[in-house]
Amino acid sequence: MTKKLVTQAIMQCNEQGDKAFVPYIMAGDGGLQTLKKTILFLQEAGATAIEVGIPFSDPVADGDVIQQAGERALAEGITLRKIMKELASFKEEVKIPLVIMTYLNPVLSYGLQSIAADCEASGVYGLIVPDLPLEESGLLKEALKNSDVALIQLVSLTSPAERIEAIAKAAEGFIYAVTVNGITGVRSSFTEGLEGHLKRLKAASSVPILAGFGISTPEHVRTLGGLADGVIVGSAIVTALHEGDYEKVRTLINASKNQLTNSQ
C-alpha cells in the first residue's frame, strides 16, 4: 500500500514546470448524473487532482457559495453512499487522483472501515475532514492505514510553530494550507503574512503544500501558486460550473501552467 499517489501527481506536475491545480466540486450539484461529466471535463482541462465535496447539512468551513451548492445537492437526495457508488461506476475512466472533502459525522455514520474500503473501490486516494483535529484523528488514520487513502491535514494561518511541526510530521498526500482566516469564499486580497507562512510550511513538510480558500482569479492562481506547490480553487469553480461557464474553469486551470519561474 502507498499513500503517495496524490503526492506523486503533484510532484510530477511541478517537475513539468506547472503548479498543481485542484478544483473543488460539490458532488450532486445539478444531480448525481452530472458527476461523471464534470470530473472527466476537469481531467481533460488539465486538473492535477479533484477535490470532491460531499453535501452536508451543517458545514462549518464552507461559505455561502459552497453551502448553497450543498443545499442543491441535498435537495436531489444525494448522500455519501450514492456518491461512492457513482464514482466506482466510472473509476476506470479517471486517470487523476480524487480526494473527498467531507465532515466527521457523515464519516462516522458511514463507518470507518466501510469508508476506507469504498474509497479504494471508488478511485479516491485522499480524505479531508476539516472538523477532525489532528489530536482526534487516530481512529480514522487506523482505519485507513492498510489502504492507499491519505488522510490530508489542514493548517490554518493561526497555527503555532509546534502545531505546524506536529501536522507536518503526520502529513500524508499534501498539506492543505488555509490562506484566510474564516470560511471558504471569494476574497479580493490576502493577509500580508501569507508568504512567510507558506515558506515555513514548505520548510517543515516532506509533502507538497497546496494553498486554498479565497483563490478565485487567474492572478490569485499565479500568485499563490508561486508561493506553494499548487492551489485549490473552490467557490469560483462551483459558481462557474453551476452557470455552465466552462471557459472560466479552463482559464483558471491554465493559470497554473508554466509557473516554474514564479516558484520559490
Image (tube, rainbow, N blue to C red):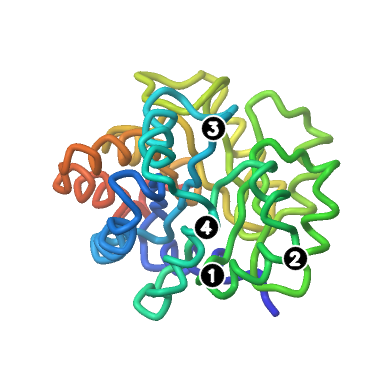
Label 4: which residue? 99
- For the point 48% across and 41% down, the residue is 55
Of the two numbered discs 3 and 2 on the same chain, state the one appearing first in sequence.
3
Label 2: which residue? 113
Compute the Cα span from label 3 to label 2.
Answer: 23 Å
- In the rendered view, tell whether residue 200 sits above or below residue 189: below
Q: Nearer the viewer, mark 2 or mark 4?
A: 2
Of 158 and 85, which appears nearest the observer?
Answer: 85
Of 247 and 38, which appears nearest the observer?
Answer: 38
Compute the Cα span from label 4 to label 3.
Answer: 20 Å
Which element type, helix, strand or loop, lies under badge 1?
helix
Q: Nearer the viewer, mark 4 or mark 1?
A: 4
Q: Are marks 3 and 2 in contact (CB under 8 Å)?
A: no
Compute the Cα span from label 4 to label 1.
Answer: 14 Å
What amino acid is labelled 4 in the image? Val
Which element type, helix, strand or loop, lies under badge 4?
strand
Numbered tag placed on residue 57 in the rendering:
3
Of the two numbered discs 4 and 3 on the same chain, state the one appearing first in sequence.
3
